[in-house]
Image (cartoon, helix red, strand yellow):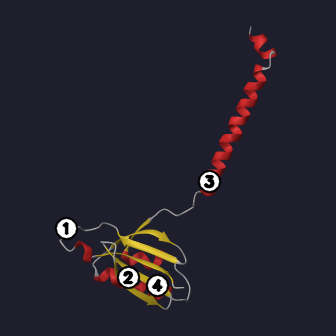
């Protein structure tokens, strides 16, 4: 009986089916890897190491946006270069007594960093500094 199945072409269809499934799975995997963005995992750093970790570079102007925990804009600044922008961020975090940072985005043109653990103990939650967004001014 097994020889009848092999002679009737069933084995050929099984092989063709396996090849089609393999090609389909490989194409799906290739598509997903091509469309997904390759990003570095978020960093957790101490405030003193921010200038070492930051990848900002360039002499052009950078825009700093200081955000409150409520998400509203607390202040905006323009820095003449990347080092001045990082120094202003460190100064702002020190003034707010924030020592541990979470960095979800770090590139030569953008740096976003927030306090690692939000402190919702006191009643003025919205007035506390939550983070800073630095981007190249256009």
Asked whether the beta carbons under mark 3 and mark 2 sit within 8 Å of each other, the answer is no
Asked whether the beta carbons under mark 4 and mark 2 sit within 8 Å of each other, the answer is no
Q: Tag 1, which secondary structure? A: loop
What is the spatial separation of the Cα atoms under label 4 and label 1, in whole angstroms? 31 Å
What is the spatial separation of the Cα atoms under label 2 and label 1, in whole angstroms? 23 Å
Q: Is residue 25 above or below residue 136?
A: above
Q: Tag 4, which secondary structure? A: strand
What is the spatial separation of the Cα atoms under label 3 and label 1, in whole angstroms? 43 Å
- Give the quarter of the image for residue 18: top right
Residue pointed to by mark 2: 90
Question: Residue 100, position in %: x, y?
Answer: 34, 71
Q: Nearer the viewer, mark 4 or mark 2?
A: 4
Q: Nearer the viewer, mark 3 or mark 2?
A: 3
What is the spatial separation of the Cα atoms under label 4 and label 2, in whole angstroms? 15 Å
Q: Is residue 32 above or below residue 92?
A: above
- State left or right for residue 34 relative to residue 16: left
Asked whether the beta carbons under mark 4 and mark 1 sit within 8 Å of each other, the answer is no
Q: Is residue 118 above or below residue 63?
A: above
What residue lies at 67% left-to-right and 44% top-to-bottom?
26
Evaluate whether residue 65 shows in this view: yes
Residue pointed to by mark 3: 33
Determine crowd level at label 2: few under 14, some 14-19, many 20+ residues with C-alpha closer than 10 A: many
Residue pointed to by mark 4: 63
Q: Which residue in the rendered view is the most extreme toward the top?
A: 1
Residue pointed to by mark 1: 121
């Amino acid at each position: 009986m097994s020889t009848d199945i092999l002679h009737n072409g069933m084995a050929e269809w099984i092989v063709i089916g396996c090849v089609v499934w393999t090609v389909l799975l490989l194409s799906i995997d290739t598509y997903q890897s091509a469309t997904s963005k390759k990003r570095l995992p978020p960093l957790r750093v101490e405030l003193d190491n921010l200038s070492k970790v930051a990848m900002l570079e360039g002499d052009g102007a950078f825009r700093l946006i200081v955000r409150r925990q409520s998400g509203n804009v607390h202040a905006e600044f323009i820095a003449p270069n990347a080092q001045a922008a990082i120094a202003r961020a460190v100064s702002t975090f020190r003034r707010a007594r924030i020592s541990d940072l979470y960095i979800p985005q770090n590139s030569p043109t953008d740096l976003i960093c927030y306090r690692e653990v939000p402190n919702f103990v006191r009643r003025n939650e919205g007035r506390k500094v939550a983070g800073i967004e630095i981007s190249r001014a256009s």
